[in-house]
Amino acid sequence: MAANSSSTGSKSSNNAGGKQSGPSAEQVVATFQRMRQEQRNMASKSADLDMTINEHSLVIDTLKDVDPSRKCFRLVGGVLMERTVKEVLPALENNKEQLSKLRDTINTQMQTKGRELTEYRERYNIRLVGEGEGEAQGQSAASSRDSEGEGTKSGAGVLVS
């Protein structure tokens, strides 16, 4: 019975100590990777929007030189619609404008996410594999000497591949 009570007591003291030290290294890495993936998704969406905007520009430039009463076809929600150039051209210009606004919003969000990532990396001393290898080794040796004097830091020196 004494062994059981002592192991239970040590578990509760470990849990209490874990809460004070912050998130574990695995949690820090998982959060960092999730944030990086969100930023990548935003970059991918922005690139897709850029391509769509370029396609709209090409079509608009082509249709500007065409007779406004000429028949043209537009794909709307998977259905091919027959319209005239003068009906389609303003709709395309409006779509292009809305897509540009959306792309600008996504780029702003992506910059904000980049700042959050940088702050998170600095807070938990996250280094990426291959990033400043020579100087990081010297800094990590110095920071490990510093942290020995201060006590342990949770998540300090986390390496993300």
Image: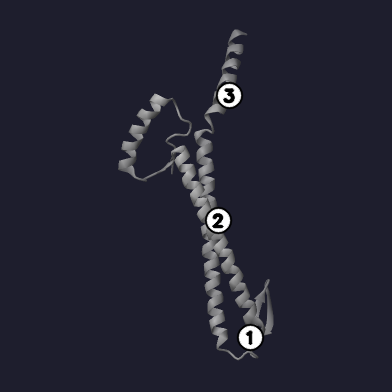
Q: Position of residue 55 (x, y in %)?
A: 54, 74
The answer to whether 137 is drawn above or below residue 45 in the figure is: above
Q: Which residue is mark 2?
A: 109
The answer to whether 49 is drawn above or below residue 117 in the figure is: below
Q: What amino acid is at disc 2?
A: Gln
Mark 1 and mark 2 residues within 8 Å of each other at the beta carbon? no
* Local SS, label 2: helix
Mark with earlier residue (1, 2): 1
Q: How many marks?
A: 3
- Front-lying residue, 153 or 1: 153
Q: Which residue is mark 1?
A: 85
Q: Position of residue 92 (x, y in %)?
A: 61, 77
- Front-lying residue, 78 or 72: 72
Q: What amino acid is at disc 3?
A: Asn
Hey, which residue is sitting farthest top in the picture?
2
Which quadrant is the N terminus positioned in?
top right
Q: Residues within 10 Å of mark 3 (few under 14, many from 20)?
A: few
Write the residue at 33% across / 32% down.
142
Residue 133 is marked as: none
* Local SS, label 1: helix
Name which quarter of the figure residue 82 lies in: bottom right
Write the residue at 56% across / 80% down.
59
Mark with earlier residue (3, 1): 3
Q: Which residue is mark 3?
A: 15
